[in-house]
Amino acid sequence: MTKAVVFVLGSAMAIAGPNDFGQQELRAALMERGITLNITTELNLDQPETYHISSVTSTSARVSGGDLRGLMYGLMDAADQVRRNGKLATTASEPGLAVRGVRVLPTDGDLTAPGFYGLDKWTKFMQMLARNRVNRVTLVLPVNRRSEEHTSELQSHSFISYAVFC
């Protein structure tokens, strides 16, 4: 029987929520290209994790999402378009799979290494997962290393809202 610690992520980034993270990504892309564009964001009644990008004028666009994750994905797609093409194209998207996850299997050495529990390490990891549209993470601890200490240490980060032994 495999035992695992399951995390439910409160957001894609430790400090910012999904909308803030997506906005930061798009702002960075616009700055890299030297483009000024007014972006309106909104939530719509579409399915979760879906989004629409529509150009309103040459200097403004609207990004909408079926939920906060969908809005974040739309903003990140807009950032990708700006980086690639220097402009936005009308786009609509929905996830091909509802659950897109990864399993992290740290070794005993990883668990005792300096920085394993560091906020910076986990923030960068969660940002990478968000950019790749991953919406589930399972951390599997070695059987001999499972303890309340590890759970509480990882749960102390604001982006991990729930941890439980399975």
Image (cartoon, grey):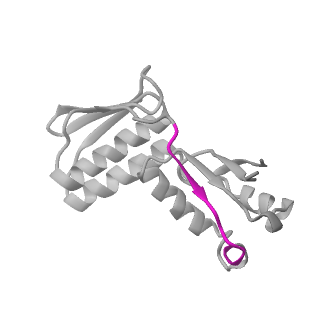
Picture layout, residue 92 above or below residue 111: above
At x 73%, y 77%, the residue is 112
In the rendered image, is residue 53 in sight?
no
108 magenta-colored: yes
In this picture, residue 133 sits left or right of residue 5: left
Picture layout, residue 129 above or below residue 61: below
Residue 102 at x, y = what percent?
55, 53
Residue 70 at x, y = what percent?
43, 35
- From which residue to which does the magenta span run? 99-110
In this picture, residue 156 sits left or right of residue 37: right
* Identity of the residue furthest to the right in this view: 148
In the foreground, 132 or 141:
141
At x 48%, y 38%, the residue is 69
In this picture, residue 101 sits left or right of residue 89: right
Residue 104 at x, y = what percent?
61, 60
In the foreground, 74 or 31:
74
Q: Quadrant of residue 119?
A: bottom right
In this picture, residue 116 sits left or right of residue 17: right
